[in-house]
Amino acid sequence: PASGSAVAAAAAALADALVDEARAALAVCPTWVWAVLALVLIYMRFLRHSSIPRVRLPLGRAELDDVWPTPGSAPLMPPPPSPSSIPCHDPATGAFLGTAPVFSRADVQAAAERARAAQRVWAGSSFRERSLLMRILGRCVLEHAEPICRVSARDTGKTMVDSGLGEVLTSLEKLAWLASSGAACLRPERRQAGRVAAYKRAWVEYHPRGLIGAIVPWNYPFHNVLNPVSAALFSGNAILLKVSEHASWSAGFYLALIRACLAAAGAPEDLVQVVTGYAETGEAVVDLTDQVIFVGSAAVGKRVMARAAQTLTPVTLELGGKDPMVLLPRADVAAALQTALRAGFGAAGQNCLGCERYLVHTSLLAQFVPKVTAAAKAMRQGPPLNGDGNTGVDIGAMCMPGEVERLEAMLSQAEAAGARILAGGHRPAGLRGQFFAPTVVLIPDIAAQSSIRLLREEVFGPVITIIPFDTDDQLVAIANQCDFALGANVFGPPPHVRAVGKRIASGMLSHNDFATTYMCQSLPMGGLKHSGFGKFAGVEGLRDLCVTKAVAEDWPAWLLGVNTFVRTAIPPPLCYPLSDAAFTFVRGTLRLFHGFTWGDKLAGVADLLSALAAPKRKAGGKNL
């Protein structure tokens, strides 16, 4: 008993000491810190969804190991393509990863039939069920973020950081927006009934199209899959998706993740069908679906559009980009520098929203050019999965074979025309994979060098091209002379940024930042000119996956269930056979509802009364 009392006394003394320490901490810590902490805790409470089912997928060495395949265990370069299989390799090391099947038209047809059968069930799902699926996907993506990034890095050559930002963060933002706001976008929407039909109740309904087709590129193999998949599923559709032959290896793992989430949500797993192959596989996807989303080059986009025209299938095209980054006078160069580097060199420049043209006011050239050049020369390049914690690498490899040679040819032509290569412009020495050094190019005289390919064609590589300008008019002319118009990014004092931004042709515009419109998932994504048309994100993109149905009914019907008070009836002068005063009645209607003066409206009333009082005409043609 005595020892027990001693223990209790010691515990009490310790508790008092802890309380005193806590009080001291509270006294020292500013009040605003605790206020911020309270707000964070409240915010986290609303974000927490403890009831969301957790998806656990078995992971293999390809998803868990940084160095795989083990050096020497597989051929360095893959075998050549064949009609039945696609060889897959790591562009950063050349290691052979395996093969993906080539889906024949019959294979695509079978996948489409499975998807359509599943969609007939899913079309009846509630928004609550669809939101739950989005949250299950979100939790799964978050908890599998590292293997998702590792697989992307292995299939495309990008760094883990580039994968985390471009593959995972954007996908989580998309899923969170759909879960919280998607239902509001697709619920019936009231519309004005107008003047003549003011007794009507009008609205728009959004119904699933059925089977969405998507053909997506290789640069972000996870997000390019999940982005159309999530939107199609939330809008009640199924999806048949073809991935690029240059990023087919990762598709199996990503599809397994998605189907595991479908099973956890109680949704049909056949809702999502992913096929691999070449052009013939893509043509079958276009032929067999109810709407097509294509993300890729302008040249292939035109072929997709021509193919879809044969069946009058609607198409959304997100094609090339050559986005400008504009530094206006008085822009903060130091603050914009890292953003400029991320915009040009992120994912080795293989980003449709990446910046390729840096329009810099002449007063800022002396600050901007040396800083960007020095940063490009200091960037570390190599295989992103290196067994050293995947650190020490700032920029990865080019994904597609032949891209290094294409960039070399573009830069050679630009240099011959007078452009100055300030950094890079070549393959880095000592690296075996498909690498191209971070490159900075200065165009001294845009008027004399406007015809070079570097300014007209999509580069899609780690090349920052700097173009000086003197006036706003010159800036706008340079920015808008390009055939592409996807996005734009303008830096400077906000009033000046807004004024210039309105004059730049683009589908998206970020003020004093880079591509933040895409992080705001409620906003639409899409461009104009050779960058395509239609939207595949935001409210507009979600509704575009639906059949928009206009509905009108007599207004009491929604309240009482019957047409009790007002119903549409053909006025007697307009009943067949028409009265001789039929047009008088029409003229009166026009004047009454759309006359601009009281005299017009009174004349309309007179016409209507006159027409109603006119003799009726019976079927035989004589007046009654």
Image (tube, rainbow, N blue to C red):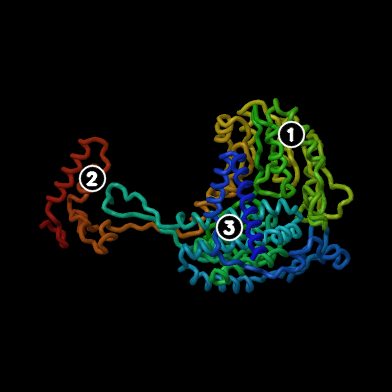
Disc nearest the viewer among 1 and 3 = 3
Q: Residue at image x 23%, y 48%?
A: 586
Q: Camera-side residue: 17 or 211?
A: 17
> With respect to residue 288, does 571 lie above or below?
above
Which residue does the numbered mark 1 point to in the structure image?
A: 449
Which residue does the numbered mark 3 point to in the structure image?
A: 293
Amino acid beneath label 2: Arg
Q: Camera-side residue: 609 or 491?
A: 491
Give the quarter of the image for residue 565: bottom left
Earlier in the chain: of badge 1 and badge 2, it is 1
**Circle 3 SS class:** strand
Earlier in the chain: of badge 1 and badge 3, it is 3
Amino acid beneath label 3: Ile
Disc nearest the viewer among 2 and 3 = 3
Mark 3 nearby-residue class (10 Å; few <14, some 14–19, many ≥20):
many
Q: x, y percentage for residue 499?
A: 55, 31
Give the quarter of the image for residue 99: bottom right
Amino acid beneath label 1: Gln
Q: CA distance from mark 1 to mark 3?
A: 36 Å
Q: Camera-side residue: 522 or 33?
A: 33
**Circle 2 SS class:** helix
